[in-house]
Image: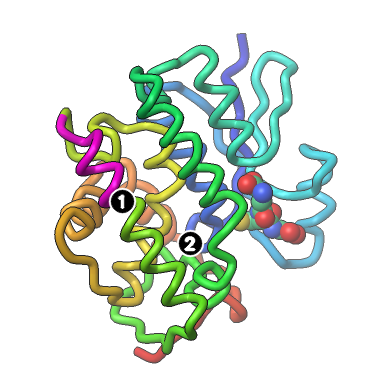
Amino acid sequence: MPKPVLVIGNKNYSSWSMRPWLALRHLGIDFDEVRIPLYIEGSKEKMLEYSPAGKVPVYIEAGVRVWDSLSILEYLAEKHPSLWPADAKARALARSVCAEMHSGFAALRSTLPMNARAGDRWVELGGDAVGDTERILEIWETCRSGHGKGGPWLFGSFTAADAMYVPVALRFHTYGIEAGGFSKGYVETVLSDEYVREWIGGAEQEEEVIEKFEKGIY
Ligand SMILES: N[C@@H](CCC(=O)N[C@@H](CS)C(=O)NCC(=O)O)C(=O)O
């Protein structure tokens, strides 16, 4: 049986690709990776070979094709229920904060694009991005204080909620966003995770530079 395939973009810039990639690694699923460098000639055509949406990530397993990060996480959770918290109340919260990430925080995402290999950047945050940052810190605190006793992740063990918020924690690090209390510990958990390190290592090997995502003074 061929291995499942995850189609991703540049490790340095593609936060949506990082999310299911991390979940696969944390679940111990053996998969092949197809990397399509983004925003260069031919990349759209290549993505369209894998997904009618023409975007990454795409997950392909035994003839099943799933695109969109949140759908891939849901698909993986069908066979690997540990991707959601076991407790129904915690699971409802986890699903809500995943959806909130997936459909929101536009100001934060455009002001602070993921740049996994960068550090010591400074960007002036506008009001909406400050509001997004405050809401994210509130989410992390609610999850960690209410459900995080069993381990260092948002709901104790690694879940889809972490897959969704790890790229945000990386941005906090890259752009020096202050995170106090539970949130500081969460950013430290993310930065010391072996799979996050592996992803950043991959980003450091990449040579492509996408100017529109290179933001901040350093
Ligand atoms: N809602 C989608 C967003 C996917 C997305 O925007 N992916 C970006 C890379 S991070 C992409 O494929 N951009 C290339 C393009 O739009 O041409 C998801 O959650 O997977």
Note whether 133 is above or below 76 in the view shown: below
Give the residue type that dot 2 points to: Asn
Q: Residue at x 61, y 8 (%)?
A: 1
Image position of 13 (left or right of 137): right
Residue 105: quarter of image:
bottom right
CB atoms at circles 2 and 1 under 8 Å apart?
A: no
Residue lying furthest front:
89
- Quarter of the picture holding the C terminus: bottom left
Front: mark 2 or 1 = 1
Residue 188: quarter of image:
bottom left
- Ligand 1 neighbours mark 1 (CB distance < 8 Å): no
- Ligand 1 neighbours mark 2 (CB distance < 8 Å): no
Name the colour scheme: rainbow
Give the residue type that dot 1 points to: Trp
* Residue at the spot of label 2: 12
2 within the magenta span: no
Real-space Cα separation, disc 2 to disc 1, in angstroms:
24 Å
Image position of 32 (left or right of 87): right
Residue 22: quarter of image:
top left
Q: Main secondary structure of the magenta part?
A: helix
Q: Which residues are magenta?
A: 141-149
* Residue at the spot of label 1: 140
Observer-nearest of 54 and 179:
179
Residue 170's tag is none
x, y (%) of residue 132? 46, 67
